[in-house]
Amino acid sequence: MELEHEQIHKKIGRSLQAIRKARSLSLDQVADLTGVSKAMLGQIERGDSNPTISILWKIVNGLHISFTSLIEEDTPQVNLFRFKDVEPFEEEDGQYRAFLMVPFDQKRQFEIYTVEMEEGCSHTSEPHNEGVEEYILMTQGELEVTFHQETYVLSDGDAIHFSADQPHTYRNLAKSKTMYHTIIVYPAV
Amino acid sequence: MELEHEQIHKKIGRSLQAIRKARSLSLDQVADLTGVSKAMLGQIERGDSNPTISILWKIVNGLHISFTSLIEEDTPQVNLFRFKDVEPFEEEDGQYRAFLMVPFDQKRQFEIYTVEMEEGCSHTSEPHNEGVEEYILMTQGELEVTFHQETYVLSDGDAIHFSADQPHTYRNLAKSKTMYHTIIVYPAV
DNA sequence: TACATACGTGCGTTATAATGTACATAGTTC
DNA sequence: GAACTATGTACATTATAACGCACGTATGTA
């Protein structure tokens, strides 16, 4: 998010006004729906006031919208990522290679790697911060994932989802290279 | 969200304290990271104060977390998805097959498909709702994506990201089956 | 035309958000 | 033991959030 943190209340004001006008509601009507005073709603929309979380709570509940719809910008565009242009992170003497295909971005809240593991390779991942989750999408090969003393074997096309804030281990069970896509989702960051 | 609107600031206080303790940070350290006073952080954690959006913005940016992580409950678990157990959606006389590997979920805000396209297959996707975005991760083959009168050719391992609220067309350029993972991300509404 | 209503803004008042500082408590070191 | 440091809480102060009400403007109706 490129927005300076001092200005978030102005962004929220603009978003709130856009939503209100999209629904052809007056400040009075929104006041009735949300239980927030008309005068305060006007202040918020003009960016003249910095609302507390309880006021915003009333607004999102009254209007049936989400916090993110008040915060996020709209930036459609195309981003192309070339596998051959990406340098991998290598571990296990180069037997484990992680290519960061889609980097983390505040708006996105996740990042995507392509991972390659050579035959016999095993790799333990340190626990991520609390709330981080991981999705693995198998591309080729056979992968064993150990999580919470449980072992899961994934074949071509399989997928798995688990909390990545605990230690977990990957092992290539195939007689050749195993590949998969891994999506690391951060708690709404 | 089942929380009474009078209590949202108390829920946020509990979440903030849980995150702080999970990271073994003191109030002083969080104050340094976020630029919010130690005294205010204490008030927030104890539910003694109802913070403004600007204060919460400083906190989420300083700690690299999100609003939703301050509001939502935490339900970690493992979900395993087997390719062979998934029935595809078929189009283009069965030449285009989409397997829903990870279904949409309110908490998740995205869904994941594995798509297979036979040689010569072409497929136009209807525009999704405004704000929907799509990520394509190539598994095998060669895919042409047309978006906004622009054409992008993706090879093994490549990836692309674009707004899916406009019409877009996929075409398999390979002399055999092309496969890719597609992640459809919905705006939090 | 006058009048009524809708709408958004300005203003004064009250409660409280946010801060810096002091303090109490606990733990560590000499 | 004393001295020091870390930590969270209490308190006084200042700025402002949030409200109810009044007002100016625009629109519609008799």
Image: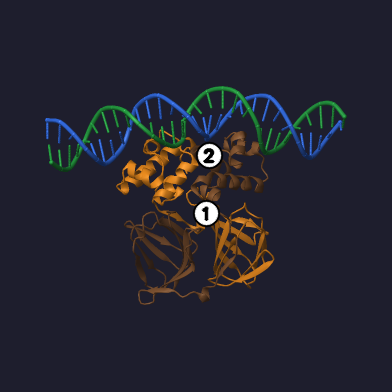
Chain colours: A orange, B brown, C blue, D green
Mark 2, residue position:
B50
A117 displayed left or right of C5: right
Q: Mark 1 — residue? A: A110
Circles 2 and 1 on the same chain? no
Residue A117 vs A49, above or below: the answer is below
SS assignment at label 2 = loop
User: Does the rendering let one see residue B176?
Assistant: no
Q: Residue at 59% x, 48% y: name it.
A: B15
Q: Residue at x 63, y 61 (%)?
A: A96
Asked if one can make out residue A127 in the rendered structure from this viewpoint, the answer is: yes
What element does badge 1 sit on? strand
Q: CA distance from mark 2 to mark 1?
A: 30 Å
Along the line of sight, the residue nearer the viewer: A98 or A23: A23
> In the figure, residue A14 lies in which quadrant?
top left
Question: Residue C28: x, y in percent?
Answer: 81, 38
Could you tell me residue B103's position as x and y percent?
Answer: 48, 66
| Circle 1 chain | A
Q: Is residue B175 above or below residue A23?
A: below
